[in-house]
Amino acid sequence: MAELLTKFPRRRAVLLASLLAVGMTATACSAPGEDRSSTQKSDAAVKTELGADPITLEMYAETGFPLAKALADEFSKQHSNVKFNVREDQFTVIVENAPRVMASDNSPDIIRLPTMVDLVKDDLLKNLDPYFTAYGWDKFPASQLMQLRVGENTRGTGSLYGMGLGYSVTGVFYNKKLATQIGMTQPPATVAEFEELLAKAKTGGVQPIMQFNKNTAGINFPHQALQNQFGDPTLVADWIFQKPGATFDTPAALKATQTIQKWAQAGYFTKDANALDYAGMVGEFQKGNGLFMFNGDWESANLDKSMPGNVGFFLFPTESAGGKHVAMSAPNTFGVSAKAKNPDAAAYFLNWVHTNAKAREISVTVGGSSPGGPSDLPVPSAAPNTVLAETLKASQQLGAENGAVDFTANATGGIFAAAITPEMQKLIAGQQTPEGYVKAVQAEYQKELSR
């Protein structure tokens, strides 16, 4: 979904692209950075022509996100000699499977990347710098590709190892009928106003938040939304990018965790949140069983179909009135396996996703997100009075405020499955304290970095 998870009207600039930097922390050159893998350094001769020979591309994608399959189907429609075998798993399964799958003789050509640093360290991901040069990806905004670069055991600088299939933004969806029912006339401007709405909903017999927490910690969405506001978001970005000395055990993370505990105890989440998976959450929200749902723009098109005219969206509010918004925003990252049988065709597909007019339209209409790519290419517009139009407008706002930050779930290969998810489930169940939560997440982080 980033899992987490994980998406304008009439403008030529690529909006979410400018936000994909963890924009507050660093700048990246448009040229590729230092190559981390000497074994791939000499592999500069790449083909940018697809040819007419039959090709089958193996793709490993994330369950519940139809964009990858929709793009694959359209690509095959335009290039009849190319077929796709698409395997799908939940994000946490991909986290666990990726190293083993990519090291096998049947490694996929294109894979949804749960994280990159460990895969690069183990030489399992193909360095895309030769394709960066061959395809002219220097025409993409440098910030768009920054999260997809890996240097010496860090992200944000270095060589390019991934590309996005859609560039998403997260926030809060709301049921307009329920909002009217509790007297909400406009999105909240501060965290305090948001909490007032939660209390009004609970008092009025409306479920305040419909949020999943089974299999993967969906409550990490509101947790990080709070964490981003309660402290300097550059500290969150430093931790995600594994900057030396960065820690999760901060006053902001603790305050966010205390707030999540307070919300759980107040009944703002459903009693069965730990038994509610992603599909169940979306289904319940579509039935009108929740006022708010923390999620990403990838659900926009689906919600427009299932709840036409009854869904709104806003960026999570700031702690103080007038502050700058911060939101989790990242590409739906895919890479090419180092053992891919068809690496040139895989790279051709990734370039096509960003530059083909129909592919860009699919990224918006199916993925609900900016297609990224060269700044001079137009972004397909969304229909007026739709939640898709609202999410795209929100992403433009976030870009203007330079407020994008990656997901904490992406900090290391195992942090989400090994610490964030189980510890968040314990917190919601009353079996973990806020202090214990932040220390447990940091302990797992340090354990993984020391391997």
Image (tube, rainbow, N blue to C red):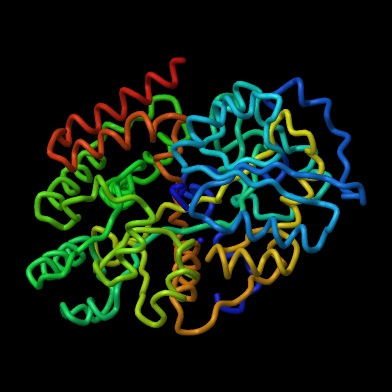
Q: Nearer the viewer, residue 151 or 384?
A: 384
Question: Residue 373: horizontal and vertical position, in percent?
Answer: 68, 58
Q: Is residue 263 depicted above or below 128 in this figure?
A: below
Q: Residue furthest left?
A: 203
Give the residue drawn at x 81%, y 41%. 344
**Residue 254 x %, y %:** 21, 39
Q: Residue at x 48, y 65 (%)?
A: 395
Residue 207 shows in the view:
yes
Residue at point 58%, 70% (across, down): 365
Q: Quadrant of residue 327?
A: bottom left
Relative side of 57 to 120, left or right: right
Q: Nearer the viewer, residue 219 or 341?
A: 341
Q: Is residue 17 visible?
A: no
In the figure, 91 relative to 373: above or below?
A: above
User: Going 23% across and 61% down the picture, which residue do you hit?
Assistant: 209
**Lateral position of residue 373 relative to residue 177, left or right:** right
User: Where is residue 385 drawn, in percent x and y?
Assistant: 45, 84
Q: How many marks can you see?
A: 0
Task: State the residue lying farthest toward the top.
Answer: 451
Relative depth, front residue between 295 and 216: 216
Q: Is residue 203 above or below residue 260?
A: below
Q: Is residue 162 left or right of residue 185?
A: right
Residue 413 image position (x, y, % from top left): 47, 30
Q: Is residue 21 above or below residue 105?
A: below
